[in-house]
């Protein structure tokens, strides 16, 4: 297959949260391949350094990696400022970081609930807050907040996660209205079941995959690259009049 190149992404400063592994790593790789000046933040330090090294060795501009806990908002702000000093103010933000840890209703404490919202929702807003001044100064930008199909299909077993991901869509809609006058677009990217290494190791069984293929209109696995390619389009000028929407990439599951 041949896929699109986006001239408007060449040399554009792009910031990705949770970029060291899984979907995040695919995002970093795809934006780097477009010639963007990529910065990414992750708690997985060894994996982040390895990814940056690998892309530089492959001849792409070396991404600016910063190790930080996104639940620590002061650390998040510092990492964003440090990346911006190296790449320039981001005009693309992909809020990718999340953790879909399973949890039973009876086991959830107030502290656990707050922690799940911190890792799946809160940092998205504060990352937006941090990059908006630079986007305004640059004449606009694109913010892509990662959602999830889980709450839409009524998945159980992780109520704090599904609550967080439902909230991402509501937050994005409101931000799109607030930031539209500044030519800053805000969209939600909603993946279906993406076959990352973690998903395959923890939850993909023959029975689960058979049910998935029965539900999906397209009878193929989805991979991180499928999400990255949609993110490229949402970041590029090609989607310049698209904002406040949720873009589902699920093989026709929903």
Image: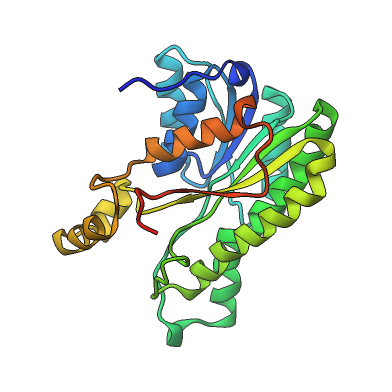
The percent coordinates of residue 68 (x first, y second) are 59, 46
Q: Position of residue 46 (x, y in %)?
A: 43, 38
For image coordinates 51% across by 47% down, the residue present is: 43
Q: Quadrant of residue 59?
A: top left
**Farthest residue, direction top:** 59
Query: Could you tell me which residue is drawn at 83 percent across and 34 percent down?
Result: 136
Residue at image point 67% right, 53% down = 172
Q: Residue at x 81, y 50 (%)?
A: 178
Indicate whether 187 appears above or below 48.
below
Examine the rendering and report whether any part of residue 66 can be seen.
no
Farthest residue to the left: give it: 206
Residue toward you, 159 or 113: 159
Above/below status of 111 relative to 82: below
Residue 35, image quadrant: top right
Q: Residue furthest bottom?
A: 106
Q: Is residue 171 visible?
A: yes
Q: Quadrant of the C terminus?
A: bottom left
Colour convention: rainbow
**In the displayed structure image, the side of residue 74 where residue 217 appears, left or right:** left
Q: Where is residue 20 drawn, in percent x and y?
A: 46, 39
Could you tell me residue 98's position as x and y percent?
51, 55
Q: Nearer the viewer, residue 216 or 222?
A: 216
Task: Identify which residue, 29 or 86, lies in the foreground.
Answer: 29
State how many labels appear.
Answer: 0
Instruction: Say which quadrant the N terminus sits in.
Output: top left
Is 224 placed above or below 99 here? above
- Residue nearest the observer in this picture, 247 or 201: 247
Side of 115 where 49 appears, left or right = left
């Amino acid at each position: 297959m041949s896929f699109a190149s986006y001239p408007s992404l060449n040399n554009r400063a792009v910031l990705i949260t949770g970029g060291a592994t899984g979907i995040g790593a695919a995002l970093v790789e795809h934006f780097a391949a477009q010639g963007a000046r990529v910065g990414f933040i992750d708690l997985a330090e060894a994996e982040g350094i390895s990814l940056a090294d690998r892309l530089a060795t492959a001849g792409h501009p070396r991404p600016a990696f910063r190790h930080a806990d996104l639940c620590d908002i002061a650390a998040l702000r510092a990492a964003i400022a440090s990346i911006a000093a190296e790449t320039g103010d981001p005009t693309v933000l992909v809020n990718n970081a999340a953790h879909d840890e399973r949890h039973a209703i009876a086991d959830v404490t107030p502290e656990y609930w707050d922690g799940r919202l911190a890792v799946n929702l809160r940092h998205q807003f504060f990352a937006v807050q941090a990059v908006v001044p630079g986007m305004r100064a640059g004449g606009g930008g694109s913010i892509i907040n990662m959602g999830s199909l889980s709450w839409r299909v009524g998945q159980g077993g992780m109520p704090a996660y599904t609550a967080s991901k439902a909230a991402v869509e509501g937050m994005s809609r409101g931000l799109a209205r607030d930031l539209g006058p500044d030519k800053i677009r805000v969209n939600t990217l909603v993946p279906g079941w993406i076959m990352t290494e973690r998903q395959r190791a923890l939850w993909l069984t023959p029975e689960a995959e058979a049910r998935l293929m029965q539900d999906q209109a397209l009878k193929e696995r989805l991979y991180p690259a499928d999400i990255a390619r949609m993110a490229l389009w949402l970041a590029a000028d090609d989607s310049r009049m698209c904002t406040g929407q949720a873009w589902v990439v699920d093989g026709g599951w929903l």
